[in-house]
Amino acid sequence: FEQIKNRHRSIRQTYVRVKDNNRRTGASPVTSQFHDDADEIFGSKDIVNPPFTIDTDAAKTNDDIETVSIDEQENVIIEPEAQKRTNYEIRSKSSSPSSSSSSKREENSSISTIISTQIEEKRMKFEFELETKRIEEERMRRQSEQEHEIRILQMLVALARPQQQYPIASTSIPTSFFTQIQSTQPSACPTAVEGSLPESSGDVRYEMLSNLTFN
């Protein structure tokens, strides 16, 4: 029974100390494990010590027990509200960087994916243009070779054809148009008709008739 009374007293005194502390201006509010229950029991009543009589030795022993019980409750049960808020803020801050770093990693990953996609598209476009250019150059080279071969074939065909024989105009002069004159005197030069030829050999001279015509 004495232990129950001591326990009751320690709980009541703890409640009183908590109430006094919370009434002070600027003091951090504190609470205890059974604060709400104690408030229901002691909140509407005047907090007074019940009158009872004990002997000196028992009172001293009870005071020692009460002191130990109060110290235990202060160390175990009472937790300042400011400490609770501090712990909550610490937990919030510790969890906030992790979520922030996670969102940053996701953002960096998405940016990296976009950049990789753009680089791949540019590479494929460059390879396509390069292949198209190579095909066009190959087509032009073959076309040039074909045209060159056609020109060579045309030249060979032209050289293989027989040359056309064209008649050549005769420039020979028939002897019927000439009169052979036998000169008896070598030094004498007979009068020549217009169009006569010069002396060919020795005393033989040819005289061209005035009506000389060519075939």
Image (spheres, grey):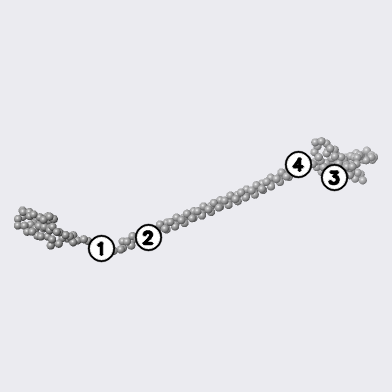
The kind of residue tagged 1 is Gln
Residue in front for this viewpoint, 62 or 124: 124
Residue 90 image-quadrant placement: top right
- Kindly identify which numbered label has been placed on residue 150: 2
Q: Secondary structure at mark 1?
A: loop
Residue at point 50%, 53% (across, down): 129
| Residue annotated with mark 4 | 86
Q: Which is nearer the N-term, disc 2 or disc 4?
A: 4
The residues bearing labels 1 and 3 have C-alpha atoms spaced at a distance of 139 Å
Q: Give the farthest residue toward the right.
A: 53
Q: Is residue 214 visible from the viewing direction of this image? A: yes
Q: Which is nearer the N-term, disc 2 or disc 3?
A: 3
Residue in front for this viewpoint, 12 or 72: 12
Q: Which is nearer the N-term, disc 4 or disc 3?
A: 3
The kind of residue tagged 4 is Thr
Residue at point 81%, 41% (across, down): 30
- Kindly identify which numbered label has been placed on residue 165: 1
The residues bearing labels 4 and 3 have C-alpha atoms spaced at a distance of 22 Å
Residue in front for this viewpoint, 186 or 13: 186
The residues bearing labels 2 and 3 have C-alpha atoms spaced at a distance of 111 Å
Q: Which is nearer the N-term, disc 2 or disc 1?
A: 2
Where's residue 165, x and y in %? 25, 63
The kind of residue tagged 3 is Asp
The residues bearing labels 2 and 1 have C-alpha atoms spaced at a distance of 28 Å
Label count reads 4
Q: Seen in the image, is 55 located left or right of residue 95? A: right
The residues bearing labels 1 and 4 have C-alpha atoms spaced at a distance of 124 Å
The residues bearing labels 2 and 4 have C-alpha atoms spaced at a distance of 96 Å
Q: Quadrant of the C terminus?
A: bottom left
| Residue annotated with mark 3 | 36
